[in-house]
């Protein structure tokens, strides 16, 4: 049976809430709760003194706390936070009446994969609604920009629905654009999803588009921020790592280089979450930020068509990524070839009209030197023609037409050589 946490908070969780939750307080006029970094400092002090968070609720624990000498933490502030018992009881009653549950990092039901992948970056508190077992289920993170074109949305929907047929859940952020499209698409076909929200958990939990799936235990909404908190850019950025931490693989559908939460989250994951491979959509309509992520270590997402073995395909791609080759120079060369083949369709699309290397590099947001290398390869292979006056590059239409004619000839010969009954069924 799917698991739903009960409404009785463990003593450790009560202490963590008292220390870290805001309860709707005004941070400018009232004592500020601990940030995640500050709580980690306190947690380390507790461990050194062989104490648990719940020990701070006892008189003996508070006496020990008076001796704390940790930078950024002082006893008066900690004492005030621990005395907020009445506020805690009112807040918890409100949240549980809304159907929400609360987990502290010390809870046995707290998702282990967050601790394993994020270590001390795992949130001290998780608020949520829905089946908690989904937080331990294999999943693909599907993330992308809020402002995404129609092709990006359609691509997102196809991937999400393939996840459902592959018995994989979708993990996303719930924001407008790619995130929302991924979640709605997988739910439409009976699949499962987890949404990691940056704000307004209590409001989103009652939205009609999600309510039925929550009741059917196919959708879980979580947040590390106060359920009534409004949108905050810092919170939106901060929750990105939790999306990756709950996933086995990640797909960036759309990203702008150097801008927005999608870019920041992908770069952070590539740097710090090594066991979650980051893939990107690569086609003629994918934005330049996707190409730049390839240069930072992301991999092109497997090409369509996908089938019900999507997880096997991704696991194979992950193994290829993780297995070192005997010759590092060969590995680098093969990786460069993969990137070149992935970005070539985008380059050819831009070169329907002549462009110089500098302009093309600026359009794709890559280094001019890197673009020049790609253009030289494309010229050498005959896909692109180099114009000398003025110096520019353009698609070699004759080569493309010849390639197309050869393909058609091959298909025609195949049909002619096939038996009549096979040709009729083709």
Image (cartoon, rainbow, N blue to C red):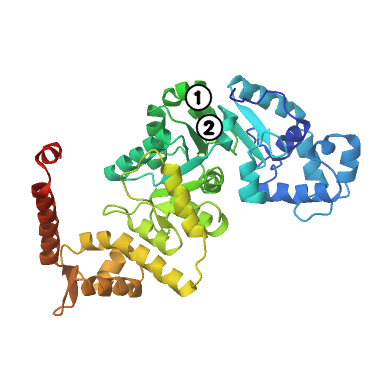
Crowding at mark 2 (Cα within 10 Å: few <14, some 14-19, many 20+): many
- Residue 397 visible in this rendered orientation of the protein: yes
**Residues at marks 2 and 1 touching, judged by CB atoms closer than 8 Å:** yes
Q: Where 169 sits versus 41, above or below?
A: above
The quarter of the rendered structure image containing the C terminus is top left
Q: Can residue 228 be seen in this view?
A: no
Q: Is residue 258 left or right of residue 242?
A: left
Residue farthest along the bottom direction in this orientation: 388
What residue is rendered at 36% in x and 40% in y?
307
Question: Where is residue 299, by image quadrant?
Answer: bottom left
- In percent of width and height, residue 40 lies at 72, 49
Residue that label 1 marks: 214
Dot 2 corresponds to which residue?
Answer: 221
Give above or below for 158 relative to 278: above
Q: In this view, does 288 lie above or below 38?
A: below
In front: 330, or 24? Answer: 330
Expressed as whole percent of the image width and height from the top left, the position of residue 421 reads: 12, 37
């Amino acid at each position: 049976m799917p698991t739903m946490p009960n409404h009785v908070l463990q003593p450790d969780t009560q202490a963590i809430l008292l220390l870290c939750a805001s309860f709707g307080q005004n941070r400018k006029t009232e004592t500020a709760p601990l940030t995640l970094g500050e709580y980690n400092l306190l947690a380390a002090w507790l461990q050194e003194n062989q104490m648990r968070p719940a020990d701070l609720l006892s008189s003996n624990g508070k006496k020990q706390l008076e001796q704390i000498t940790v930078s950024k933490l002082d006893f008066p502030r900690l004492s005030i936070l621990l005395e907020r018992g009445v506020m805690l009881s009112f807040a918890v009653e409100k949240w549980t009446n809304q159907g929400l549950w609360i987990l502290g990092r010390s809870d046995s039901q707290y998702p282990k994969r967050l601790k394993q992948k994020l270590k001390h970056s795992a949130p001290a508190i998780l608020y949520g609604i829905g089946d908690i077992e989904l937080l331990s289920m294999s999943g693909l993170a599907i993330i992308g920009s809020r402002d995404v074109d129609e092709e990006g949305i359609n691509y997102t929907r196809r991937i999400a629905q393939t996840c459902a047929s592959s018995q994989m859940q979708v993990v996303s952020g719930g924001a407008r654009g790619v995130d929302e499209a991924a979640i709605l698409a997988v739910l439409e076909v009976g699949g499962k999803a987890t949404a990691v929200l940056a704000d307004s958990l209590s409001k989103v939990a009652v939205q009609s588009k999600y309510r039925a799936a929550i009741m059917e235990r196919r959708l879980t909404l979580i947040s590390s921020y106060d359920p009534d908190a409004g949108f905050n850019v810092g919170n939106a950025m901060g929750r990105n790592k939790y999306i990756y931490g709950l996933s086995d693989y990640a797909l960036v559908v759309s990203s702008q280089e150097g801008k927005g939460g999608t870019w920041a989250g992908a770069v952070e994951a590539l740097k710090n979450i090594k066991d979650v491979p980051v893939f990107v959509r690569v086609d003629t309509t994918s934005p330049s930020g996707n190409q730049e992520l390839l240069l930072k270590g992301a991999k092109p997402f497997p090409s369509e068509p996908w089938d019900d073995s999507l997880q096997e395909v991704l696991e194979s791609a992950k193994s290829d990524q993780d297995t070192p080759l005997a010759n590092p120079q060969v590995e680098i060369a093969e990786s460069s070839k993969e990137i070149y083949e992935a970005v070539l369709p985008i380059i050819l699309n831009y070169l329907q009209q002549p462009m110089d290397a500098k302009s093309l590099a600026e359009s794709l947001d890559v280094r001019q030197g890197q673009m020049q290398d790609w253009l030289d390869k494309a010229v050498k292979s005959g896909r692109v023609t180099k114009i000398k006056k003025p110096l520019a590059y353009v698609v070699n239409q004759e080569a493309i037409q010849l390639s197309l004619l050869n393909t058609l000839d091959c298909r025609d010969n195949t049909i002619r050589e096939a038996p009549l009954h096979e040709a009729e069924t083709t």
